[in-house]
Image (cartoon, helix red, strand yellow):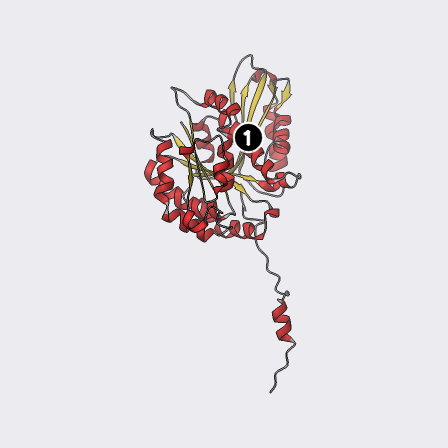
Amino acid sequence: MLSLVGIGGAGCRIVEQFYRKDLVGSIIKKISSGGETVRGVAIDTSDTITKLSNIPASNMVLIGQSRAKGHGTGGSVRMGRKIMTEELELAMGAVRKANIDKPEMIFLITGIGGGTGTGGGPVLAERIKITYNVPLLGIIVLPAKSEGALYTKNTFENFDEFIEPLDGVMLLDNNVLANRGEDFVTCYRILGEAIFKFLGMVNPGDLLRLVEGDISTIGFMRMKAEHIAVKDILDSVIRNNLYFDLEGRKFDKINLIIYGNLSEVYGQSFAKNWVKDKYGVEVDYIFMEEKGSKYLNIGLVITGLKDVKKGFEIKEDKKAVSDLDDLLGDIKPLF
């Protein structure tokens, strides 16, 4: 069973993707066996959660009503942490209802930068690990710079603590889509569909082996099964379907997963050399044959990301002075 826990506005919207009627049937067919299903829980401090029409009502929890009044935390990490700590059992009640049977692993899905996810995420993660004792993987969306200095500051200051309870982390970056001119609603829709399709094709055991104990990013692409070089597949998915900017960033390895008609794929050795020359790392392959398939389902996992907080530093301008300081500076002492 695939178990998802979405926290905050970003996480809840992404979990909603898994309950859309036109999508849920196909993912269950892909990843389920023996009648198992996808189980998704949405937890937020904003009453916008009630507008998520596809998630079962029993799987949605509005926490912090006495403090946040249904308006969210206003980006306050401290408030998000306090609310989750005070109402942890309320949140865990929904998680338990959705996971009557012990899941194989659990995915914690959230954005970092806002108050609910950034503050409440680690609190809930610790309790989930104690309760279920299964791998807990994080799928985390980094905020776009246009979301404001507070989100940037929260990310920089809380990232290390945020990922501490997780057994592995997969990052996606809203900046990639925002820089293409997408609005935030569209950003989360695109990211949600990418996560949905990726998890729908990858073997959970393979994914855990690749990302456990690491910071990674993921991508998905589906294309027609026609005579195509692995190098071209890699280049296309990195340029068009990877929501994380690799420019100038160091990482350990590229892992390419292809399911489909493998007779249409060639040039594995050439691709290895191309990746080595371009990125200075190795590439590993996971191939699964589906004879007669007209399509290739392609997953990408880039592991060992370095300097993830780079770009989220808040640089203070020491030369800048406030209007009050400027005014006081002009006042001459009387004596």
Which sits in the foreground, 128 or 84?
84
Q: Is residue 267 above or below residue 81?
A: above
Q: Is residue 330 left or right of residue 140?
A: right
Image coordinates of residue 204 in percent, x first then y, are 44, 28
Q: Is residue 333 above or below residue 233?
A: below
Q: Is residue 263 left or right of residue 93?
A: right
Q: Residue at x 52, y 17 (%)?
A: 289
Image coordinates of residue 272 in percent, x first then y, are 59, 29
Image coordinates of residue 301 in percent, x first then y, are 53, 33
Q: Is residue 10 above or below residue 36?
A: below
Q: Is residue 24 above or below residue 315?
A: above
Residue holding disc 1: 193
Quadrant (top left/top right/bottom left/bottom right) for the C terminus: bottom right
Image coordinates of residue 230 in percent, x first then y, are 61, 24
Few, some or many residues within 10 Å of mark 1 (<14, 14–19, 20+): some
Q: Is residue 140 visible?
A: no
Which sits in the foreground, 234 or 330?
330
Disc 1 marks which amino acid? Glu
To which quarter of the image does residue 107 belong?
top left
Q: Is residue 44 left or right of residue 327?
A: left
Quadrant (top left/top right/bottom left/bottom right) for the N terminus: top left
Which sits in the foreground, 71 or 131?
71
